[in-house]
Amino acid sequence: MNVEFLKINKDAAAKQLVFTPAQIQEFLAQESGKKKVKEYYDIHRKEYEKDESVRARHILVKAKKGVAAEEKAAKEKLAKIQTELKTAKFEDVAKKYSDDPGSKNKGGDLDFFTKGRMVPEFEAVAFSQPIGKISDPVQSAFGYHLILVTDKKPAQKTTLEEAQNDIAKIIMAQESIDRKIEDLDKQLATDKGAALAGFQALSKGTNWESTGSFSIA
């Protein structure tokens, strides 16, 4: 058997729909609309409440904490790195010297992170360090870090009242697509050609795909 099928991305189809301010206000004026918006907000609350975050680069020099020989070697390497940082870009030096395989090839870039993601010693400096200033060596269980904060984002909270219009549009669009799919399902029994054309339109240009031959035995 070989089956052809059409993928319908409901979210992509929903994003194409446009509603007027009057339609949105009419939806929000209904108790059922208000309830749906509140439920959506509660489920997706993390999207509307963002913690403070920072973006940083770091150079790690590994050394086991408490092992004198390793700490001494790490400090000597750090001194060399700090000298180079006076004339070279941080990211270039990180690519050259960092012992962190996850960020080394990205010039030490750790992207944005919130509190609780890094070890306490690293985090304390990253969230207090000014943008653009290279820290003194920071020791953690991994070794010694030189930290360069490149950006900061303050904590943000979007209230239900501030978000309700956007949420209403999302719900209205999803419900509209669901109704359209339900109507097309029913239409398949009476006018298959028109129904398939409707599904094709919802797929936003996605072509029919094939599973390839497979056995049903």
Image (spheres, rainbow, N blue to C red):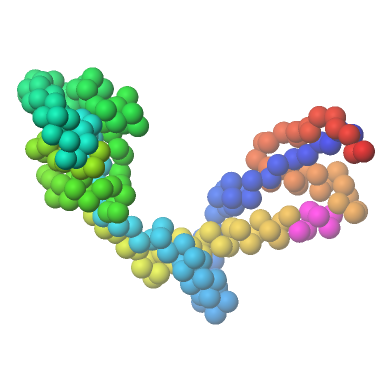
Q: Is residue 169 shown above or below 137?
A: below
Query: Which one is in front, 95 or 161?
Result: 95
- Tell me which residue sits at (84%, 54%) in the image: 187
Question: In this view of the protein, can residue 149 be seen by the observer?
Answer: no
Q: Is residue 8 shown above or below 174?
A: above
Where does residue 49 sit, x and y in percent of width and height? 35, 61
Query: Which one is in front, 73 or 139?
Result: 73
Residue segment shown in magenta: 182-187
Where does residue 30 sit, x and y in percent of width and height? 55, 77
Q: Is residue 214 left or right of residue 166?
A: right
Query: Which one is in front, 60 or 141?
Result: 141
Q: Is residue 174 left or right of residue 116?
A: right
Residue 183 on the magenta segment:
yes
- Tell me which residue sits at (30%, 44%) in the image: 112
Magenta: main secondary structure: helix
- Tell me which residue sits at (56%, 62%) in the image: 171
Instruction: Name the quarter where the N terminus is drawn.
Output: top right
Where does residue 134 sit, x and y in percent of width and height? 12, 35
Q: Is residue 211 left or right of residue 179?
A: right
Q: Is residue 48 left or right of residue 75?
A: right
Instruction: Name the quarter where the C terminus is drawn.
Output: top right
Where does residue 106 sit, x and y in percent of width and height? 31, 27
Question: In this view of the protein, can residue 33 be seen by the observer?
Answer: yes
- Tell me which residue sits at (78%, 58%) in the image: 183
